Image (tube, rainbow, N blue to C red):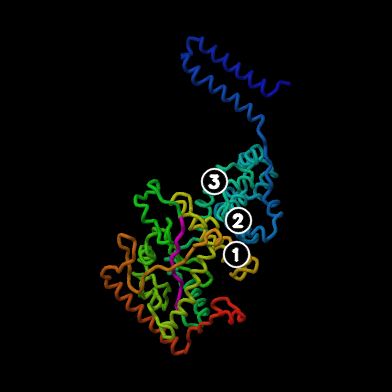
C-alpha cells in the first residue's frame, strides 16, 4: 500500500510532468517565469500541507457538561461570577436571541452528530468531527467571556478550553459585540424607562418603602462612575487625550448611571471623557435633554430622580442641601436623601468587584472599552433579575468579601471621593477645574426653582413627622468595642 508521503511525491511529479507536456504544445503559451514563480511553489505548498495534515494532532475537548460537573457551586461562582442556575438561564436567553444554529449548544451539536446527515447539517458535522477539537459550543464561548470579564487572560482560557490564543480573542470580541450587546439582551434605555408608567410606579414604591414613605416619588438614584482605560490615541478618533485624564490620576471614561432600589441599572451614558464634571456629563446625555422637555409631565405624576451635590438642582433631580448644619431640618433631609441614594453607589461597587477586568485599565480600543462597560452593566442587571429574591445570598457575600480584600490589596489608594459642585450648574475651565456656569436659560431657571420648592416640601414633611438623623455613636461608627473605652 502506498503511503501518504509517497502519494504526495507521485502527485507532485505527475503535475509537473503534465505541465511540461502542455508547455511543449504550441497551443500552451506559458512562460518559464510562470512555471518557476507560480506553479512550482504552489505545488510544493500543496505537498507540504498534505504532509503536515497527515501528522496533525486531533484534540478531543472535554464537554462543557463534564467541565461544569467537576466544579462545586462555590468554585463555579468564583470562576464565572454567577451561580450555575443563572448561567444556564443566561445561555438559554442568548440562544433564544441569536438562534440555535449560531449559538450551537452542546445539546444541539449532539443532535446533529447523532441524526442522519442532511445537506444542511453536513458542514456542521464535518467541522465538528473532522477538525482539531471540533466546534466550540456556545456554553464554552459564554463561559470563557465571563471568565475574561472576571479578570482572566486569553492565555488562561485558551489553555483551559484547548483553543488557540488568537481564536479565544476572536470569541471574546464576538460574544461581547454580537451576543451580550444585542438590543434584546437587557437593553438599558433611560428614555424608554421614563415612558413606562408601570416600571416607574414599581421603582417609586420600592424607594418609598425603604424611606418610610419620605422619598415617595423617587424613580431612580443618579451618580457618576469613573472607569479606567488606556490612553486613547488617534486611532480612536481622539486628538486631545488629556480630556480623558480624570481627577483621580488616570485616563478614564465618565459613566453616568441611574439605578433603582434593587440596584438594577435603568439608564447609563458612557459617552463622556474622564475629565468632565458629573453635572456636565449628565447634561450631555440624551436623557437630560428629554427630561428638560418633559419636566412638566414628570412633575404632574410626582416623579423625580435623586443625585448628590455634584448635580444641579432641577424639578426632576433633587439634590442635598449645601452646608447643612448638624441637627437642622436640612440635615435631616440630607440623611434620608443619602440613605436612598446609596443604592447607586452599592450598584457601582457590586459591578466593580464582580468583574475583575475593571480592576485595572481596559486595554482595548475606545469603542471596545465602552462595549465592555456596557456589557458589565447588562450582565449585572441579568444577575439581579435572575437571582432568588433579587438579593445576594450568603455564598455570594462570602465571595464578595474575599474579592474586596483582593481588590484593596491591588488598589491600596483607591478612593471614591465626590466631585465639587452644588445646586447650580457647573462647567470646567481650561485646567479641568469646576467653575460656575454661564447664565442659565429660562427653562433651566424655572426647573431649578421648582426643584427647591419640591425639596422644601419633603424637608417640611420630615420635620412634621419629627424624623431626625440618628445620633452619632463613636463605637458604632468606628467599629470599636466598649473595652477600648479606657484606652480612648
Q: Say which label, 2 or 3, has the lower sequence index.
A: 2
User: Where are the magenta residues, as a range?
Assistant: 217-228
Quadrant the C terminus occupies: bottom right
Q: Say which label, 3 or 1, has the lower sequence index.
A: 3
Can you say whether 235 is above or below 452 in the image? above
Q: Label 2 vs label 1: CA separation?
A: 24 Å
By secondary structure, the bulk of the magenta-drawn segment is best described as: strand
Q: Say which label, 2 or 1, has the lower sequence index.
A: 2
- Residue 346: percent from the left, percent from the top? 52, 69
Residue 219 shown in magenta: yes
Which residue has dot 3 on it? 169
- The reply, left or right, for residue 125 in relation to residue 320 is right
Q: Label 2 vs label 3: CA separation?
A: 20 Å
- Residue 198: percent from the left, percent from the top? 48, 73
Examine the image and state in which quarter residue 272 appears: bottom left
- The reply, left or right, for residue 277 in relation to residue 181 is left
Residue at image position (56%, 54%) is: 151
Decide: few, some or many residues near mark 1? Use Cα within 10 Å; few <14, some 14-19, many ≥20: some
> Which mark is drawn over residue 400?
1
Residue 115 shown in magenta: no
Can you say whether 488 is above or below 94 in the image? below
As rendered, which of 277 and 221 lies closer to the eye?
A: 277
- Residue 389: percent from the left, percent from the top? 61, 71
Examine the image and state in which quarter residue 432 appears: bottom left
> Judging from the image, what secondary structure is the residue with disc 2 in?
helix
Which residue has dot 2 on it? 91
Residue at image position (54%, 78%) is: 477
> Judging from the image, what secondary structure is the residue with disc 1 in?
helix
Which is more foreground, mark 2 or mark 3?
3
> Judging from the image, what secondary structure is the residue with disc 3 in?
helix
Decide: few, some or many residues near mark 2? Use Cα within 10 Å; few <14, some 14-19, many ≥20: some
As rendered, which of 300 and 383 lies closer to the eye?
A: 383
Amino acid at each position: 500500500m502506498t503511503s501518504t508521503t509517497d502519494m504526495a511525491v507521485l502527485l507532485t511529479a505527475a503535475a509537473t510532468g503534465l505541465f511540461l507536456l502542455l508547455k511543449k504544445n504550441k497551443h500552451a503559451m506559458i512562460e518559464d517565469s510562470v512555471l518557476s514563480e507560480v506553479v512550482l511553489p504552489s505545488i510544493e505548498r500543496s505537498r507540504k500541507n498534505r504532509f503536515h495534515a497527515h501528522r496533525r494532532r486531533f484534540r478531543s475537548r472535554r464537554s462543557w457538561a463534564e467541565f461544569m460537573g467537576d466544579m462545586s457551586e462555590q468554585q463555579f461562582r468564583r470562576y464565572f461570577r454567577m451561580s450555575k442556575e443563572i448561567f444556564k438561564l443566561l445561555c438559554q436567553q442568548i440562544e433564544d436571541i441569536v438562534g440555535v444554529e449560531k449559538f450551537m449548544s452542546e445539546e444541539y451539536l449532539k443532535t446533529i452528530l447523532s441524526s442522519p446527515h442532511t445537506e444542511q447539517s453536513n458542514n456542521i458535522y464535518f467541522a465538528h468531527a473532522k477538525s482539531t477539537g471540533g466546534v466550540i459550543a456556545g456554553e464554552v464561548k459564554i463561559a470563557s467571556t465571563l471568565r475574561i470579564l472576571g479578570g482572566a487572560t486569553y492565555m488562561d482560557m485558551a489553555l483551559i478550553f484547548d483553543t488557540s490564543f488568537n481564536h479565544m480573542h476572536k470569541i471574546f470580541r464576538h460574544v461581547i459585540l454580537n451576543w451580550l450587546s444585542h438590543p434584546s439582551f437587557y437593553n438599558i434605555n433611560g428614555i424608554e424607562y421614563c415612558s413606562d408608567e408601570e416600571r416607574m410606579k414599581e421603582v417609586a414604591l420600592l424607594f418609598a418603602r425603604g424611606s418610610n414613605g419620605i422619598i415617595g416619588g423617587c424613580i431612580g438614584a443618579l451618580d457618576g462612575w469613573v472607569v479606567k482605560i488606556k490612553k486613547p490615541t488617534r486611532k480612536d478618533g481622539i486628538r486631545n487625550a488629556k480630556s480623558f485624564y480624570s481627577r483621580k490620576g488616570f485616563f478614564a471614561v465618565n459613566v453616568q448611571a441611574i439605578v433603582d432600589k434593587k440596584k438594577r441599572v435603568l439608564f447609563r451614558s458612557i459617552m463622556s471623557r474622564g475629565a468632565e464634571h458629573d453635572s456636565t456629563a449628565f447634561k450631555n446625555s440624551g436623557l437630560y435633554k428629554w427630561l428638560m422637555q418633559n419636566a412638566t409631565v414628570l412633575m404632574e405624576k410626582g416623579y423625580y430622580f435623586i443625585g448628590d451635590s455634584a448635580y444641579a438642582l432641577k424639578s426632576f433631580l433633587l439634590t442635598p442641601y449645601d452646608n447643612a448644619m448638624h441637627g437642622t431640618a436640612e440635615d435631616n433631609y440630607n440623611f434620608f436623601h443619602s440613605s436612598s441614594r446609596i443604592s447607586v453607589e452599592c450598584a457601582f461597587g457590586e459591578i466593580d468587584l464582580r468583574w475583575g477586568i475593571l480592576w485595572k485599565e481596559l486595554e482595548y480600543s475606545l469603542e471596545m472599552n465602552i462595549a465592555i462597560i456596557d456589557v458589565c452593566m447588562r450582565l449585572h442587571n441579568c444577575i439581579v433579575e435572575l437571582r432568588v429574591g433579587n438579593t445576594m445570598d450568603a455564598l455570594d457575600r462570602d465571595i464578595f468579601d474575599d474579592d474586596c480584600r483582593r481588590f484593596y490589596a491591588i488598589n491600596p489608594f483607591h478612593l471614591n471621593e465626590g466631585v465639587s459642585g452644588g445646586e447650580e450648574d457647573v462647567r470646567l475651565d481650561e485646567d479641568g477645574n469646576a467653575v460656575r456656569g454661564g447664565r442659565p436659560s429660562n427653562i433651566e431657571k424655572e426647573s431649578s426653582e421648582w426643584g427647591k420648592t419640591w425639596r422644601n416640601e419633603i424637608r417640611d414633611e420630615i420635620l412634621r413627622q419629627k424624623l431626625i438623623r440618628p445620633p452619632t455613636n463613636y463605637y458604632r461608627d468606628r467599629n470599636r468595642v466598649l473595652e477600648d473605652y479606657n484606652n480612648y
